[in-house]
Image (cartoon, rainbow, N blue to C red):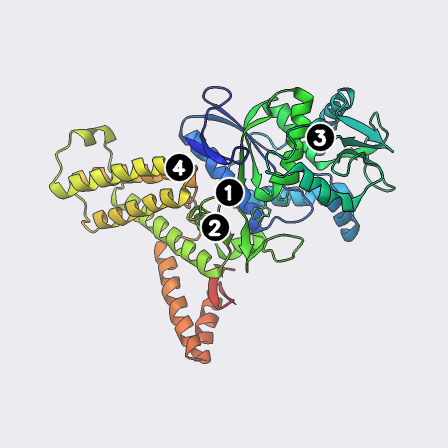
Amino acid sequence: MKLYNTFTNQKEEFKPVEDGKVKFYVCGPTVYNYIHIGNARAFIVNDVLRRFFEFSGYEVNYILNITDIDDKIINQAVTEKVDVGEITKKYSAAFFEDIKNLNIKPATHNPRATEHIEEIIALIESLVEQGFAYESKGDVLFDISKFDDYGKLSGKNLDDLRAGARVAIDEKKNNPLDFVLWKKQKPGEPAWASPWGKGRPGWHIECSAMSMKYLGDTFDIHAGGIDLAFPHHENEIAQSECASKNKFVKYWLHNGFLKIDGDKMSKSLGNFRTVKDILESYSYSAIRTFFLQKHYRSPIDLTSDGLQAAKSASIKLNIFYKNLCQAITGFESDLEIIETASFSEKDAEYLTNIKQLRIEFVNALNDDMNTPTAISKLFEIVRHGNQLLTNEPLSENQKLLGKLTQKYIEDFDLVFGILDAKGKEFDSGLVGDLMEVLMEMRSDLRTKKEWALSDKIRDSLGGMGIVLEDKEGVTTWRKK
Ligand code: AMP
Ligand code: ZN
């Protein structure tokens, strides 16, 4: 399997630290608000990679942390006029709810920064003792002049960084690029006792301490959005490697941004849509399909058309899967006999095709998680499968092929997580199909300014508990 390592700027063969195991750390959310669909991209693409490792037979130790102490959290507590603890409780619960609703598998551990203060302090002490960090007026800072490899991950040139940082001179720092490991308490802020007085940890050191605690000094994968490469991950490397004297991470993986109207979706720009909001109109299946249709490192634009297309694709898949299951209900046969069965020419061709597609699916994922190609293989199987179902009622041999198709789709889904097991939105595939037809008709009516008729459709559906929403020229529907 090959993965693109940001550290070396190339695809590399994946060789785990320990045979058969993957030690995987993902930078989790800072819990001061609901996560947006851009954040969700980071959690979905890493969930899919983790699932693919498991599909390939690895045992994965998957750590996704919660940053529950930070300036932004403190500010939000002031805004909402509640304690910091209430903010982190509320938004971490919302986070877990969101990722569950996105069909993201639970992590092995979700360490919280505030529950690892002891480990964080020990790590800072080790850096101070070894001369890589210094105390300054109650803060502790990392001295970047002591780490020659600084800038290597993000490809930043230290001289350029120094020139840029000179503007923002900070009297506490020996060098403008030095970053904070421990912050002295300001009045009213939460704080913990430490050898440098009361204070709280900086963001970067939290991830170093928690990742090394759960995964060891050297681990396989550290991932997050590309915005984290600098300074967050750069600083993590500096701290961790200076403290342990070992290589910190073998493969640094970064996902591209979800953009909206050309800008990065972000809380600070205010151009975000929360996961909760999007889940009102789109199933997790549609949302995951939307992300999987693009390579994880490419930027994606969030558009209604893109989401709608993903929704149609996921409905198509789920309807096919349901029909397939129905067509082979009660068919009990060992799949092994497929190798010795004598098929008609057409059925034999079907078998060759889907076997080939399964191989291509695995090959695509082994090539730096090429999910757009891998998912296109799934949809080719659906296309062949729909063809097979036109023979209904199926012959025994065709049921055998149907059963293999079902197994392949379920295998693919171990990685993609886009089958709707509960049949939520697809409780009847027909409903989804009929709704698509109705919405298309209504859209035509609106184009022709036939408002009365178009409103009649909306009102009638409203009476049945179905809400239509017109946004940016696209209509979506959901159950009330
Ligand atoms: P934050 O809570 O801001 O630290 O973000 C949590 C995760 O989401 C990090 O891995 C970020 O890099 C990632 N992220 C934030 N915004 C976006 C975006 N617009 N597109 C993709 N990933 C993002
Ligand atoms: Zn982190």
Front-most of residues 387 and 362: 362
Residues under numbered marks 1 and 2 in contact, where contact means CB atoms less than 8 Å apart: yes
- Badge 1: residue crowd in 10 Å (few <14, some 14–19, many ≥20): many
Query: Horizontal and vertical percent for residue 424?
Result: 44, 50
Residues under numbered marks 3 and 2 in contact, where contact means CB atoms less than 8 Å apart: no
Mark 1 or mark 2: name the one nearer the start of the chain: 1
Mark 4 or mark 2: name the one nearer the start of the chain: 2
Q: In which quarter of the image is residue 2?
A: top left
Instruction: Please name the residue that numbered disc 3 is placed on.
Output: 115
Query: Horizontal and vertical percent for residue 438?
Result: 38, 67
* Total numbered circles: 4
Mark 1 or mark 4: name the one nearer the start of the chain: 1
- Seen at 69% across and 32% down, the residue is 206
Query: What distance separates the C-alpha of mark 4 from that of mark 2?
Result: 19 Å
Query: What distance separates the C-alpha of mark 1 from that of mark 3?
Result: 26 Å
Query: What distance separates the C-alpha of mark 3 from that of mark 2?
Result: 33 Å
Query: What distance separates the C-alpha of mark 1 from that of mark 4?
Result: 15 Å
Residue type highlighted by circle 2: Ile
Question: On residue 365, which mark appears?
Answer: 4
Question: On residue 44, which mark appears?
Answer: 1
Q: Is residue 98 left or right of residue 321?
A: right
Whether disc 4's CB lies below 8 Å from ligand 1 is answered no
Query: Horizontal and vertical percent for residue 312?
Result: 39, 56
Q: Quadrant of residue 402?
A: top left
- Badge 3: residue crowd in 10 Å (few <14, some 14–19, many ≥20): few
